[in-house]
């Protein structure tokens, strides 16, 4: 994901990998998609992605003059809605007999900002205007860093995905792109 102006561009590959067996297959369902005003890019579990894409009813964020309330919104109402969707969708360990709630890792683009949601539901935001997650993240981050002068955001995302596919066998085209 990367920020260009007040838009967030996200891209994702089509590979699914299984750690136990090493099996890697291409999937037809995308790992990046829009839900309401949000762009979502996920890693970890395709079940998590399905819950986010089809079952989650996202809360509507109403922008303020400088989006000063977006941080609080993301860390409260947004996360509460995610946890509820995961619980109803049977994903993760939400309110069960575990010591803490657990979910999965995904990126959210909204209002020209990128947030990363981690397994423990903490919400992070980087100081730079791009982020990557998943098995090819380090390669994609390196590419996004070295292409800072590239003016075309979709080209930067494409180059990052191609770099990740070149060096990580669990990243593969075709690639999906969205912007929010």
Image: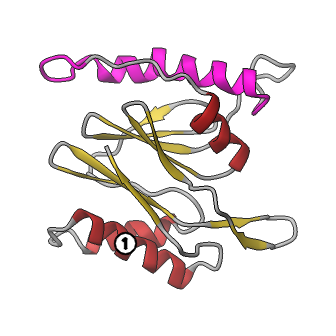
Q: Quadrant of residue 147?
A: bottom left
Asked whether, in this view, residue 15 is left or right of residue 136, the answer is: right
At x 21%, y 23%, the residue is: 67
Q: Is residue 90 above or below residue 177?
A: above
Question: Total marks drawn?
Answer: 1
**Quadrant holding the N terminus:** bottom left
At x 52%, y 30%, the residue is: 122
At x 54%, y 69%, the residue is: 136
Residue 38 in the image: x percent, y percent?
40, 35
In front here: 115 or 32? 32
Q: Quadrant of residue 155?
A: bottom left
Residue 129 in the image: x percent, y percent?
26, 51
Q: Is residue 45 above or below residue 164?
A: above
Q: Furthest-bottom residue in view?
A: 166
In front here: 145 or 37? 37
Asked whether, in this view, residue 179 is left or right of residue 82, the answer is: left
The magenta segment is: 63-92
**Quadrant holding the C terminus:** top left
Q: Is residue 26 above or below residue 109?
A: below
Residue 46 in the image: x percent, y percent?
69, 49
* Secondary structure mostly seen in the magenta stretch: helix
Asked whether, in this view, residue 40 is left or right of residue 67, the answer is: right
Check if residue 74 falls in the magenta segment.
Answer: yes
According to the picture, the residue beneath numbered tag 1 turns out to be: 158
Check if residue 88 falls in the magenta segment.
Answer: yes
Secondary element at image label 1: helix
In front here: 57 or 73? 57
């Amino acid at each position: 994901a990367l920020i260009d102006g007040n838009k967030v561009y996200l891209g994702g590959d089509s590979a699914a990998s299984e750690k136990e067996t090493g099996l890697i297959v291409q999937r037809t369902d995308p790992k990046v998609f829009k839900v309401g005003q949000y762009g979502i890019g996920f890693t970890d579990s395709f079940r998590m992605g399905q819950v986010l894409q089809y079952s989650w009813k996202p809360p509507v964020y109403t922008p303020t003059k400088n989006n000063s309330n977006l941080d609080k919104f993301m860390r409260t109402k947004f996360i509460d809605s995610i946890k509820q969707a995961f619980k109803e969708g049977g994903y993760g360990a939400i309110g069960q007999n575990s010591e803490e709630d657990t979910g999965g890792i995904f990126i959210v683009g909204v209002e020209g900002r990128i947030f990363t949601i981690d397994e423990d539901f903490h919400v992070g935001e980087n100081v730079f205007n791009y982020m990557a997650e998943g098995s090819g993240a380090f390669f994609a981050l390196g590419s996004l860093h070295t292409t800072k002068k590239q003016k075309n955001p979709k080209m930067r995302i494409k180059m990052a995905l191609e770099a990740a596919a070149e060096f990580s066998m669990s990243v593969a085209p075709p690639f999906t792109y969205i912007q929010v």
